[in-house]
Image (spheres, grey):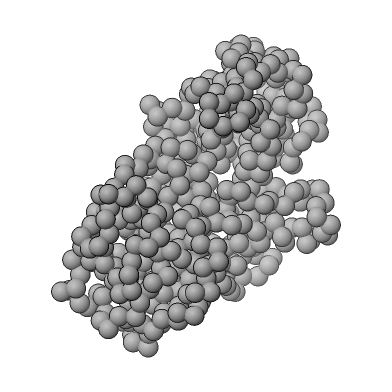
Amino acid sequence: MIPNLNLPENHIALFLNSHPHVKRECLEDISCQYLNQVDKKSCWGYEDDCRDEDVVKHHRCHEPAWGLSGREQEDFFWKTADFGYIKKKKNQLVSICQSNKKEGSSLNCSKHMRYCKARNIYINLKQVDFVNSNNRFKEDVFKPGDLGGDCTVNQTLIKSMGSQKGALSSWFSELKDFTQLNFNAMESKDRCDASIREPTFFMKLDAGINMYHHFCDFLNLYASQHINSSFGTDVQIIIWDTSDMYYMDIFESTWKAFSNKPLLYLNDFAGKTLCIEDALFPLLPRMMYGLYYNMPLIPGCHGTSLFRAFSEHILHRLNIRRDTKDRKIRITMISRQTKHRRVLNEVQLITALNNQPGVVATLVGYSREMSFTDQLKITHNTDILIGMHGAGLTHLLFLPNWAAVFELYNCEDEDCYYDLARLRGVRYFTWTDVAKLHQDGIGQHPTISDHKKFANYTFDVTEFLRIVNQAVGYVRNHPEYIEATKNNYKINNTHGARDEKLKVDL
């Protein structure tokens, strides 16, 4: 019997089409709960037998860029920011260590060792000094023989992959000394102080207190699951950290979307040898031309199936549902509780919004005192998200497909959340008339140069309402919003809004 896949409904057919043996089992089992999905032809686009007409695509390019034709621009966007990126990484996989034995070891990696998959490997952590280290990603942890497998290593190929090494951009520093061993790790109990037979994901993490950076970790882990063609939660996640320092993770509930086991840390195996049957070294959060930090995103295009699927996957696994009862346009404004980039008249702005017909506005502090799942419940039931430039705007990843995000002021960092909104496929608005905002102070920082990010602001109420009015109009007229709400309540059209052209992506 096929177990519950625990995937969003619209991902089931795509999973079955990329796992033909599971699809075959379902067809042969009259009790299979997914029989209504087996005739669908849809695919993500990276599968070998996926036809172009069956690829699930949500992107649209509406403005020319970089001298490319319309088709060239769409292809470039798909290949660099969507599932075409996954296809490229899958096609890059090469064998670095291989064995002719049935139960032998193996190591396969993509270019620059950005992603690697290994079987039956041995890791000796007896000489690693975790306690006296303040470096989470020490480069020379292993000597030859400390990490390896029962397979023939291509040292020339390993050496060719080190040109883009970096703590959060490659696994080269960790795997460069992968060694051919004369024993099979999983069959040599006397050599292994600890053995793990479940699929094991090693993770090198960015800042766990910053949603923008930490969700680069989660997005790349999800992308790696596609490369690996596995979405089960019976996996062990081990945080690769060569120090003994505390790692604060205020989004730790997100791990439940990937594993049903408690997280382990590398230093949990300090002084031991570790043998792993199935190891994954996923894509990392700060890769050159990676997803999505410092990503050079081609202009003029909007909406990726990859980021939409990631959003749907996380929301499904964390059981976040949308309430469509008694629906007005729901506006959530993020109240920053930091020293800088506070909105000094936020109460006045919220009051003005709630005096508008057909909307309900809430001021929310996404602080550590509120659980992340509770934050997601608010975000996913938001139609328009408003906030100053800051990591909290990463919540836009979990807005409904019809939603809009209003970055009150980008503080001269124009592309960060504009590009993230384009990747997710939600509409982006921002303040353009700086004469209608007031900066409190000169933006001075005690240790680095002055910047707009180090000040607080007051916003003109009339201009604020004008921009929100545009966002309301966009949401009201979005086909998915109309479809989602038509059976629950009558759409109130009293809040008429023009969809004026600003720096926005349709």
- Residue 77, x across and y down, in percent: 70, 56
Q: Nearer the viewer, residue 498 or 290?
A: 290
Question: Where 105 falls versus 465 (above or below)?
Answer: below
Please state if 109 lies on the left or on the right of 238 as rendered. right
Residue positioned 26% across, 75% down in the render: 185
Q: Is residue 246 visible?
A: yes
Q: Nearer the viewer, residue 216 or 499?
A: 216
Question: Where 197 falls versus 358 (above or below)?
Answer: below
- Residue 450, x across and y down, in percent: 62, 28
- Residue 438, x across and y down, in percent: 68, 16
Residue positioned 53% across, 46% down in the render: 311
Q: Nearer the viewer, residue 244 or 37?
A: 244
Residue that sits furthest to the left in the current view: 190
- Quarter assignment of residue 449: top right
Please state if 99 lies on the left or on the right of 421 as rendered. left
Please state if 22 lies on the left or on the right of 74 as rendered. left
Q: How many marks?
A: 0
Quadrant that contains the C terminus: top right
Residue positioned 42% across, 50% down in the render: 205
- Residue 326, x across and y down, in percent: 55, 24
- Quarter assignment of residue 454: top right
Quadrant that contains the N terminus: bottom left
Please state if 257 lies on the left or on the right of 386 as rendered. left
Residue positioned 45% across, 43% down in the render: 207
Q: Is residue 357 visible?
A: no
